[in-house]
Structures are given as structure tokens and as C-alpha cells.
Image (tube, rainbow, N blue to C red):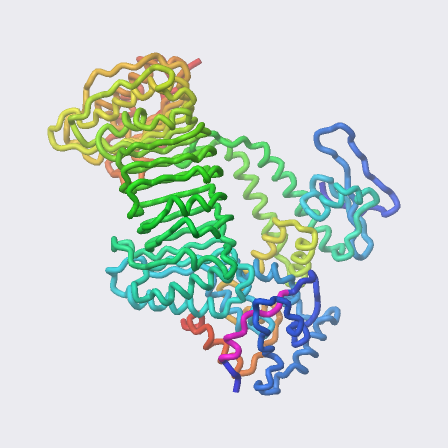
Amino acid sequence: LVNTSALSNCKALPPWHQEGNVGRRGAAAMAGAEEDEVAPPAPHPVDPQQPMGQGPAAKRSRSEHHHGAGDAPSFRMEDLPVDVQAVIMSLLPLKEAVRTSIVSTSWRMLWTFRCNLSFKGPRYLHENDTKIQQAKCIETVNCVIQQHSRIGINKFSIRCGLFEEDSVHLDRWIRFAASSKAKIIHLDLRFKDVFEEVNHLHLEALLDAQGSSFLRSLFLGGVVIKPHSAICGFTILRRLVLQSVTISGDFTGFLANCAALEDLEMIECSGLTNLIIPQQLDKLQHLLIDGMEVEMVEFYAADLSHFEYKGQVVPIVHHGCSKLKKATIMFSGKKGLAKAFTAVPSILPVKILNVRSVALSKYSQLQKLPTRPDGMFMHLRHMTCRIIVHSRPQEANYDIEVLQLAYCLDAAPQLETLQLNMFYVSSSGVSSAEVVGMRRHDHLKAVFMSGFRCYKAQIKLACCILGNASVLEKLTIEPRITGTRYLGDNTDLHKILPGVCEWAQLTSERFAMDASSAQQGEGSLQHHH
Amino acid sequence: MAATPADASSSSSEAVVGGEKSNKMITLISSDGESFEATEEAAKMSVTIKHMIEDGCADDGIPLPNVPAKILSMVIEYCNKHAADADDTNKHVADPADADEDDDNNNNNASAGEKEDLKSFDASLVAVDQATLFDIILAANFLSIKGLLDLACQKVADDIKDKSVEEVREIFKIENDFTKEEEEAVRKENAWAFNE
């Protein structure tokens, strides 16, 4: 007897505007609907098509009963201010929140004011039940967005691989996101084991009818976009992250209209030859470029504070005065460390530097770095360095990159702390015994080395630092492999440990320092005052 | 400093002039006329009260007609406990070095114990009957005390989580006023959530 289609078109109940309003959520309230974008809801308690058994009369008398002192029901969820209700609903997992709709009529629509909607589906194409799970996810999303009030949405997030034929759903989701004025949209439609993006996403569709957007933060993954300079509605967008996105058209022109952007991250996107960040992005604080196959990177970004680049060595041109404080450089290919210190002049002013290098080729030679002031890192205080080492059997000098660090220290005379994480993936070669020297360093206070297993090159480096760092307070060595995504082999630690501790003991005596070993095998040499 | 109901007649604001932190006591008056005292620091955890103090309306005590005495004393207890914590957090200087690896930050050892302490205090504060919890929420909302509001809302969410519909109705003393047809319709509308 109940008209289900009328109910499912019911967009929203009018929100309470008065706090502590102990009125009745009945027909009277609904008549006061103020949202002009919402169709007058079908008032369900007085829906004439409903059986009158539990009709409005019964309901009204029950809610009057609420106001009696003493024997009233003790928690009147419906009497809480609507934004508090939304908070409570948002603290429940979505499924549970939706299930509260069955508790009572007054609870029925509570979940539709939930501010965060997140959905997860299968991320890998080649798994058994991908198709089924994916269909389920799509159905769930469609069901929820149909019922949701569209009011107060903060975050709308879908992480689910999508096929080309699902584009009709994608369009629907975009329309919902735009009309609900969501502040944060996260659409990750990648199948992680597929490398071609097929889902076309129209950026204009994220704008509302007036061509503007309430978006603060946008993540797009696994889509094809065609930006152009006429799209100018993203005026309050602060954060833009694109991962595995195919870009054609005028990306730079589009970016120029996002003048509020503070954080731009591009990961493994394709379609761009050069990445040019226009000067209109003068509020940009953080720029991340990872695995992009571009020939050149150029940016203005006068306010940039944190720059990250992972990929091939390409010209990186940074115009304008630099407020850069922190940089992360992970060049692929040979001599990653030396390149990080020389190939990107605009990072010279940083205070904090993260570098990573993969030691691959035995033909690497040590490279001395410029020691004139305009070629050095005069403000660098803290450095984190990851070196991943591969070797072939009998290969000599395979880990010479570790020694390169000594020359890098020459180029950072103000450095105070150094964290070096080494990961020897294989060590069947001959560890480098190259001679390496270092200038006296008057600021280096604390050094931490993990993956330290008394390889020749590691010992050489440690002794070089111990001998030249005049104010060194503490050198900590940790045989375990830390600080890297790779799962290091820490299983044979107990065999290595005694050797490392012994070395630490001997070395500390040699350099007149105190040695101490922590429980897990971490040893530290501390300067004795 | 525990909240003590003070005589309405004795005014006990002691302004410390020129100090960093004023030790001024603020008088808060519950809906049933009881007076409570709190330090200005604790009272300012309520944004509502903070504005009133800054606007100079707090000198003769602040009447809170929406908050009964029983609830007000709990609110003040919360504020006292958390005002001290907020102060300590502000004093902790952030490590400038990049901390994306998990290095031991010895500075936190002392406050780890305090954090546990706070956690158990919070848990016991909201381990109350539903009616009281409801009133705490209303008070925290009215007084704009975010931490307390979040805490109480989380408790409600925890009371709902992992419970069956029947259990939820029992906890919150709610009558099921759906007709069979209505209930069917709701289940159908959101089939995905009910199918398990």
C-alpha cells in the first residue's frame, strides 16, 4: 500500500534550525521546508496512502509523552540539533548508519545527513570475484546517493575499479557530488593491475549549475581528463591530486584558474610532454611530481615550501625567489645522490632534504661536489638519505654510492642531523674500499645509520664521519633495515649482531667515544664529554 | 581544582593583574540556580563562555539556563581536566626535522602516561545513563566545547555500533513505530545494508 517510489524520491527533511528544539518531527515540521532546491518531501507519517493504524494521531501523542518528566524515553535522538545527529551518524560505519533507519520512524532519515560517504570496491581486475564485488559496490553507491539528503556533505569518496561500460554510473556520481556541494571528492577508479585509463571524466561536470564549485580537495585516479583554460569554476580548490590520470588539452591553462591551490600532486600521469605550473599559483605550498614521463618541469610558485620529485633526471626550472624549506629528490638512474645535489639548483636553500638513490652500476665513480657557496646547501640542517644497493656476484665497488655521501656532506656544511637508511638487496659483490675523504664538518651532531652490517663501504663512511665531524655527539647504528617500503630481510639479524657490536666497541675506543647497545641491537657511539 | 558549589552571595573573582595567565575564577550558574566556580582557563574551553568573557559579560557570573547543575558540574570537571592538558601540548616544541620515519621521540614518554589518564577519565565521564548522556551532548553543543561534544557523540555511536536493531531500541528506549509495510519498504530501499 505504501508508494515506494514517492518515498525514494523524498530528497530531504527540513533541517532543524533551532537548537534544543523539542518540537515534534511530524507533519507540521515538514510543511516548513525551506530548502528551495529540495522538492517538498512526501510527508510520510501523513501519507494518505498509508494505513492509518500507526497514523499521525498515535505518533503525536507519543511525542507529547516525551515531554513528561520522569517516565520519558531517555535519549531523544530526534530532539538533538541536526548537526549533532549528523556527527553521530558519521561516527558509525556507513552500513550501520543506514541500518539505524529501521529503528523507528524518527530515526529513519537520520543517516541521510551523514557528512562523509566512503565506498570501497575491488582494486584489482584479475581476481576471482572482481565483477561481482564491483557490481555490488556500484549498487551500494547508487542506492545511497539516491537517498541521501544532499545536505552537509563534507567528503565523497569512491575507491573502486571501474569499467568503461560503467560510465553512466560515473556520470551519476559526478552529478551527485556536484549538487551536494561536497568539499572533498576522492574518486579512485583505477584497477591497479591495468595500465590504460578508460574512464572519461568531464571536469566541467563537477561544477554546479552556476559554474562554480565548493570543492576544496580533489583526488582523481584512473581517469582521462581534458582540461582547458575555459574551466574556471574551481576557485576555492586547495588540493589537487592526480594519480594515473591521462591528461590531454591545456593543463597549464586549467591550472592557472585554480589560484587558491596550495597542494598539487601528480603521480604517474601521462599525456604531458612538459609540466608547467603557471605563475598564477602563487599560493602553492607543496608540489609533488612522481613517475611522470615528462621532458621538463617548470614552475613559478613563489610561495612553494615543499618540493618533491621522483623520476628521471630532467631539467627542473624554478622561477622566482625561493621560500623552499623542504625538498625530496629521488632520481632514478646512476649517481642519484650526486645528481640530487647538483642537478636542481633551486633546492639549494632548503632546510630539510630527503634523497634516495639506487646503487646499480659498478661504473659509478665518486663525484666531488661544488664547494663554492652558491653551489652548496648553506641552510640544510636535516637530511634523510635512502640508499638501495644491488650487486652481482664478484662485482667490485658495487656500493660506492654509500661513499658518495661523504662528499655530499662537504656540500652541506650546516648539516646537524643525518639519517641514512641502507638496504643491501644483495651483497654478493665486493664492497667498495675506495679512498674517500671529507672536509672537517663543524655542525654535524647526530647521525643514524640503519641497515648497517659492517660492509666495508659502510665502515669507511662511518669512520670518515667520526674522524671529521668535530662536534658529533652521537652516531647510532642499527643493523635492521628500516625506512623503506621494501621488506628487508631482518631474519639473520642474530648472526650479524655480535659482529656489529664488536665493531662498535672497537670503533668507539678508537675515536674516544662511549659505545652503548640498546636491546634490539641498536648500538650508539656517544661522545664522552 | 574541583568544582565546588559556592555561595551565590560571596563573589570570589580574584583578578591577577599583569600575570601571564589570569587565575581569575569564573562563576557559572546552572539552570536550577546553583553556582559553580571554574578557572578562567578551564571556562574558556567553552567557546560560548570565552566570547562572553571577552565581551565583558562574565563579571557577575554567567547564567546558563540550559544546563542543570548535575550536568554543569560534569562539564566543569571535563574542562578542568582538559585545560591542563591543552596547556602542556602547547608547550611541547615540535621537532623541526622530518619525522616521517618512526624515530623515538623521547619527549612524548612523559605525556603518554598522562594521555592514558585522560582517556580513562573521559571514558568514565560518559559511562552514564542515556538521559544524562543526552543532556551532556546538549550542554556541550550549547557551550561549544568541541572535545566534550565529540566524546559524548562517540559514546552514542559506540552504543549503536555492532548492536542489533532490537538492542538499539532497548538501549535508547525507543518504540518501534513502523508498520510491517513501512519496515519492508525501508529494508528494500537499502537492501544492500540489510542483506547479511
Residue A152 percent across, percent down from the top left = 55, 59
Q: Residue furthest right?
A: B9
Q: Which residues fall within the magenta stretch?
A: A5-15
- The one of A254 and A307 positioned closer to us in this rendering: A254
- The one of A145 and B139 positioned closer to us in this rendering: A145
Which residue is painted at 16% across and 32% down in the image?
A391
Residue A50 percent across, percent down from the top left = 57, 85
Pick the quarter of the image with the C terminus of chain A: top left
The secondary structure that dominates the magenta segment is loop
Left or right of A499 on screen, residue A174: right
Residue A15 percent across, percent down from the top left = 62, 65
Q: Residue furthest front?
A: A230
Which residue is painted at 31% across and 13% down in the image?
A510
- The one of A43 and A398 positioned closer to us in this rendering: A43
Q: Is residue A7 magenta?
A: yes
Left or right of A203 on screen, residue A406: left
Left or right of B171 on screen, residue A257: left
- Residue A293 visible within the image: yes
Residue A279 percent across, percent down from the top left = 44, 37
Q: Is residue A220 magenta?
A: no
Numbered disc total: 0
- Residue A521 visible within the image: no
Vertical position of residue B86 compared to residue A509: above or below: below
Vertical position of residue A296 compared to residue B184: above or below: above
Q: Residue A422: which quarter of the image?
A: top left
Vertical position of residue A314 compared to residue A412: above or below: below
